Image (cartoon, helix red, strand yellow):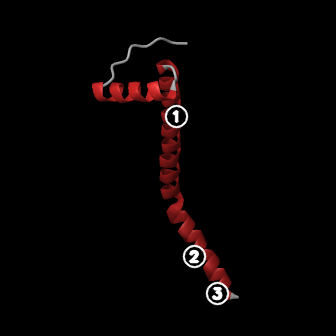
Amino acid sequence: MKTISLKIDESIFGETEKILNRIKKPRNRYINEALDFYNKLQRKQIIEEKLKKESELVQEDSMSVLKEFENIENAD
């Protein structure tokens, strides 16, 4: 495990402490789970952005291929 120093806004700290008292979970475990969740969310968003950019790059080619297929079907 790594040790870090963390500055937290008062309002976030207060809300976190209320939740921790209610769910009976150690602060360290709660913060680790929150960071893990946020990391997964960020990885998902990074992948979505990458796929969007890649999709935009091939969009013109895809439309061209689609038109060629339509022309082949219409020729029959």
Q: Residue 44: horizontal and vertical position, in percent?
A: 53, 43
Q: Secondary structure at mark 2?
A: helix
Q: Residue 23: horizontal and vertical position, in percent?
A: 50, 29
Q: Amino acid at mark 1?
A: Phe
Q: Which residue is mark 1?
A: 37
For mark 2, does the 10 Å Cα neighbourhood hold few (<14), some (14 to 19), or many (20 or more) residues?
Answer: few
Q: Nearer the viewer, residue 4 or 29?
A: 29
In primary-sequence order, the first of circles 3 and 2 is 2
Describe residue 67's horizontal placement relative to residue 6 as left or right: right
Mark number for residue 5?
none
From the image, state whether disc 1 or disc 2 is nearer to you.
1
Q: Amino acid at mark 3?
A: Asn
Q: Residue at x 55, y 70 (%)?
A: 64
The quarter of the rendered structure image containing the C terminus is bottom right
Q: Nearer the viewer, residue 35 or 10?
A: 10
Mark number for residue 74?
3
Q: Which residue is mark 2?
A: 67
